[in-house]
Image (cartoon, grey):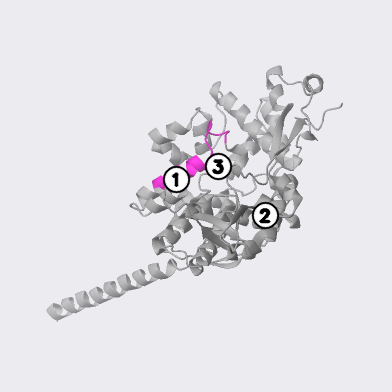
Amino acid sequence: LILILIPLKIGIKTIEYSALAKKITIEQTRNKKKIINDPVYGFVNIPYDIVFDIIEHPYFQRLRRIRQLGLTSMVYPGAYHTRFHHVIGAMHLAIQAIDTLQSKGHLISDEERKAVICAVLLHDIGHGPFSHALEYTIVNGVNHEELSILFMKALNKHFKGELDLTIKIFTNSYHKKFLHQIISSQLDVDRLDYLTRDSFYTGVNEGIVGVDRIIKLLNVHNDELVVDEKGIYSIEKFLVARRIMYWQVYLHKAVVAAEFLVINILKKAKELVLDGEDLFATKSLKFFLNQNLASSDFEFNPEILKYFSKLDDYDIFTCIKEWIDHPNKTLSTLCSWMINRRLYKTEISPEPYSDEKMNSLKAKTLQQLQIPEEDLKFFVFSANIQNNAYNPKKDRISVFYKNGETKDIAEASDQLNISSLSTPVTKYFLCYPKTLTL
């Protein structure tokens, strides 16, 4: 009996293991065909296994912890959406754009389609905490585009070269230039999504654009992404909406004040750490506070990218909350202002502020706040902000006519204000303590 039962048990186990392996394989296949319910567009499909794998990677999941609009929630309480929301939405629009171009007879292979979708998905993966607010603060002279490429290369190594074409298209080194324009241009899916999404979450209706119509009217002419002439009015609205959103949301004076406040907090914290202060900080933030790193350092030391990949909004706010009780008056004051939303008093002017006014504010700040003179730069300062809704010198938006002719949107439009949108508008702002008695 023993001799008979043992083979039977082995046989049963073999069948069970085989069935289990089959079940796991089926489950893995099913899991990669997800549908994401987006509040702006509805259901968004994940079209390729590699897309699912990228989304599941820790580098990408970090985007759930990076706010799309940084500190804009200080002004618009609903603006808590993340970079994760944005790139999923931009990917959805990229899929629609490619489908539109293919329906008009333009040859885009499945590999090219997949590469563009992955590039759009990864175009913001290099963003640091609070998005643009700390772009040049944590690491010297490194923008998010450079870091995005480094992340892409790291992921490409992880996925054994599957992102080779993605990187070529993203860096505009692929022969079909219009594919890069879907990802990065003055009418890319990045801008189409963030205007629509930011309008939705802030409640600023002036930023709403006709995304569906614009995408349906995309075309390609001489390897350039163009818009059919029927889309002129939609593009006009898009450019006007972008300008309004910059002044009303992205460059709102209270948003600017909040961003500079958190920048100054980190600058002061770094000063203290480099002077030998054992300052509380999360492991990932402490790594960057302890040294001055540049873009070249990332190339030579892959470990730096791993530290950066663990850095998000939570690190910054956790430390700011803790630093409220720090004995250094400058640091504790700035942190208290940030946590309790006691932002700088901010003035806006079309002209630079005079040295006389700046010196007067600095003298009053020293007298009333009793801070060290070398820390005045954190309390009274001036800089400028610029709004350029359309820059034809950098990359134009072309309107395509039935006779094969193309025109720049500024020339094609019968709206005089479209031409004026190509002229940069510079404003100057002045920040000083709100508690100051003038």
User: Gap between marks 3 and 1, in whole Å?
Assistant: 12 Å
The amino acid pointed to by label 2 is Ala
Is residue 32 shown in magenta? no
Whichever of labels 3 and 1 marks the residue nearer the N terminus, that label is: 3
Residue 344 is tagged as none
Q: Is residue 24 left or right of residue 113?
A: left
Would you call the spot at circle 3 few (<14 residues within 10 Å), some (14-19), or many (20 or more)?
many
Query: Which residue is tagged 1?
Result: 151
- For image coordinates 36% across by 55% down, the residue present is 162
Q: Is residue 296 above or below residue 422?
A: above
Where is residue 33? Give x, y as percent: 45, 68
- For image coordinates 49% across by 52% down, the residue present is 180
What is the quadrant of the N terminus in the image? bottom left
- For image coordinates 70% across by 60% down, the residue present is 233
Q: Is residue 424 above or below residue 245?
A: above
Query: Which residue is tagged 2?
Result: 412
Q: Nearer the viewer, mark 2 or mark 3?
A: 2
Whichever of labels 2 and 3 marks the residue nearer the N terminus, that label is: 3
Quadrant in which residue 273 is drawn: top right
Query: Which residue is tagged 3?
Result: 128
Is residue 150 shown in magenta? yes
The amino acid pointed to by label 1 is Phe
User: Gap between marks 2 and 1, in whole Å?
Assistant: 40 Å
Quadrant in which residue 370 is drawn: top right
**Magenta extent:** 136-154
Where is residue 349? Give x, y as percent: 80, 33
Seen from this angle, which residue lies furthest right? 438
The amino acid pointed to by label 3 is Gly
What is the quadrant of the C terminus in the image? top right
- For image coordinates 71% across by 17% down, the residue present is 373
Q: Is residue 39 visible?
A: no
